[in-house]
Image: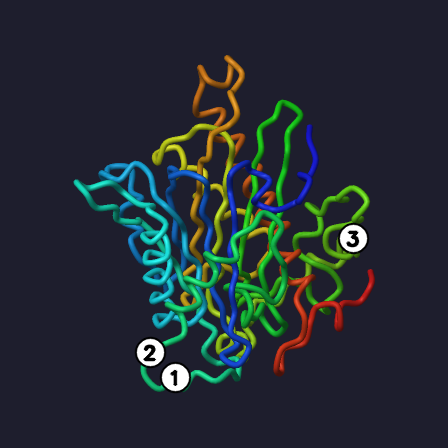
Amino acid sequence: MGAPGRLNRITDVPGLLVGQAADESVRSGVSVIFADRRFAASVDCRGGAPGTRETDLLRPEAMMPEIDAICLSGGSAFGLDAASGVVHWLARQGKGFAMAHLRVPIVPAAILFDLMNGGDKDWPEETPYRRLGAAACAEARADFALGNAGAGYGAAAGRIKGGVGSASWVSDDGLIVGAYVAVNAVGSVLTPGNRAFWAAPWEQVWGEHGSEFGGLGVDPQSGSIDHELAAEGRIAGHTCIAAVATNARLDKSCLRHVATMAHDGLARAIRPVHTPFDGDTVFSVSLPSWQAQPEDAAILPRLVARIGSIAADCLARAVARGVWEAEPLGTLPAAKQILQRV
């Protein structure tokens, strides 16, 4: 048993911070996830249109056991510049992989496609993403904004406004799992007729804050599925980029399994998902501060399966929270404007 954490964000994992920056005129932004120390991480990428940087280092057989940050950015291929801004900022803080007298920050990154949302993308020379990457680092905090923020600032979710979402789960024995996502899906997060969220079965009541994303309940007609993609969805939104984290000690091999299982959260919250237009990417992070019970430590696969299952639930909730908290932008309406109560 358990409940959402105090912040109900990925930063309920102790030591983890999220920085976000956006450019309103460009209608795009950057998110950075880092910690008070280097950490183990892995990744799993789905769909036919991925955009990533340094993710090969996260393979279990690659030499780098820990990284310094994860960068999530809008801007499609232009957004990969954001990681350079993060690297430069971390280097100035003395962070990175030690090599002789040097330190080289290791920052895997993933991008989403938000180039068609009406913002000013006609930058004269240098893109804004390197600047936004550094700015996001400077804004790192535990309690960060949801909705129109960071990498989700200009995001779309099918025909409506996407955004940044996050959620967490604290088990009674102290295990913590959290998720963070920039929702920019080709598919829809809402059931046919815009009656409810696909993720409704996993919605939680979060203390005095109430229901996480409107408490609309499960759509009794959710078995009726439209398999046709709206043309505007294929233009506006491409790719969800996310991270899940835990306070359990896991290496890259175990974290790869967690990232793979966490993708089920996207599948629970978005239909269809992992399409040829998407490059859905989920990073997984271990920032250990919790000691597993002996029976779990002796059977590591059982612990990994437990964390992966919780991560998938958190990610499904995070998707719906990101869209629920989003505000209208350009021609994209907010979910709160169009949802009908069941």
x and y percentages locating residue 199 in the rendered image: 66, 52
Q: Amino acid at mark 1?
A: Trp
For image coordinates 35% across by 60% down, the residue present is 83
Q: Which mark is residue 41?
A: none
Which residue extends farthest left? 100
Q: State yes or no: discs 1 and 2 in contact (Cβ < 8 Å).
A: yes
Q: Nearer the viewer, mark 3 or mark 2?
A: 2
Q: Amino acid at mark 2?
A: Glu
Which residue is labeled 3 in the image? 217
User: Crowding at label 3, few (<14), some or many (≥20) Cα neighbours within 10 Å?
Assistant: some
Q: Quarter of the image containing the C terminus?
A: bottom right
Give the secondary structure at mark 1: loop
Give the secondary structure at mark 3: loop
Q: Which mark is residue 123?
A: 1
Which of the 4 image quadrants contains residue 325?
Answer: bottom right
Looking at marks 3 and 1 on the same chain, the residue that comes earlier in the sequence is marked by 1
